[in-house]
Image: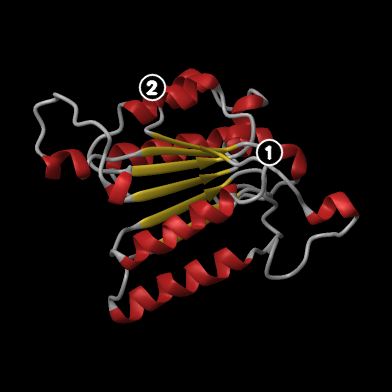
Amino acid sequence: MPQGQPLTVPDDGLTTRQRRNRPLLMVHTGDGKGKSTAAFGLALRGWNQGWNIGVFQFVKSAKWSVGEQTVLERLGKLHDATGEGGPVEWHKMGSGWSWAKKQGDDDDHALAAAEGWQEIKRRLAAEAHDLYVLDEFTYPIVWGWVDLDDVVTTLRGRPGRQHVVITGRRAAPELLEAADLVTEMTKVKHPMDAGQKGQRGIEW
């Protein structure tokens, strides 16, 4: 893509503007570091454009706190107070999805994932967000907690102009086929290989 220009122009009857503004399904997968980091960077960029951002974090305990959550939630509050940027919602698993306010423990992850996906489907149907970050969503699919065919059908048929980015290892071939943009993070070298644990500002 020299100077941001596409290599080909499809004969699809669309104008350049129409083609540029089509909603994207994006997948960040692979064994390397940076899948979620890139997705949250995209969320920051979308917030700056005034987009309504919805983050749905799978396989994360509700007790865990990450730096991106703190920043995006503060930006959401800034929007509420001043109108700058866009609204932000952040939901994660653990003791039930945060929107559901349910109690539970780690044994409830499978049920929480299934319920969370149903909530996302409702929001997609209602065109609730401009950008959905489905963080670590490949894992509930791999583990059979969420039906792959339902995910692919729903995301392909989503109405309006709703962008979706999915992160996680071992993304299913069917999901990659449905996606418009796929990035595979490949680990070349990592501090953990030398026995170094994660650190503030890098991992969280």
Of 61 and 195, nearer the camera is 195
| Rendered view: 65 above or below 168 | below
Q: Residue at x 61, y 39 (%)?
A: 168
Where disc 1 sits, the SS reads loop
Q: Mark 2 or mark 1: which comes first in sequence?
A: 1
> How dense is the environment of label 1, judged by Cα within 10 Å: few (below 14), some, or many (20 and up)?
some
- Count every numbered label the image shows and give the total: 2
Question: Colour scheme of this structure image?
Answer: secondary structure
In the displayed structure, does residue 117 sit left or right of residue 191? left
Asked if residue 98 shows in the view, the reply is: no
The residue singled out by tag 2 in the image is 153
Q: Are marks 2 and 1 in contact (CB under 8 Å)?
A: no
Q: Amino acid at mark 2?
A: Thr
Q: CA distance from mark 2 to mark 1?
A: 26 Å
Other-residue count near label 2 (Cα within 10 Å), few / some / many at <14 / 14–19 / ≥20: few
Residue 159 in picture, x, y percent from top left: 25, 35
Q: Nearer the viewer, residue 178 or 193?
A: 193
Q: Do we see residue 144 in this rendering?
A: yes
Between 19 and 53, the residue placed more toward the observer is 19
Question: Is 178 displayed left or right of 116 in the figure?
Answer: left
| Residue 30 quadrant | top right
Q: Residue at x 76, y 38 (%)?
A: 107
Q: Indicate the amino acid at tag 1.
A: Asp
**Residue drawn at point x = 67 percent, y = 44 percent:** 32
Q: Residue furthest bottom?
A: 82
Which residue bears the numbered disc 1? 31
Q: What label does residue 39 carry, if any?
A: none
> SS class of the residue under badge 2?
helix
Where does residue 128 sit, x and y in percent of width and height? 31, 49
Q: Measuring 11% from the left and 32% from the top, which residue is drawn there?
A: 14
The percent position of residue 190, horizontal first and vertical second, equals: 77, 52
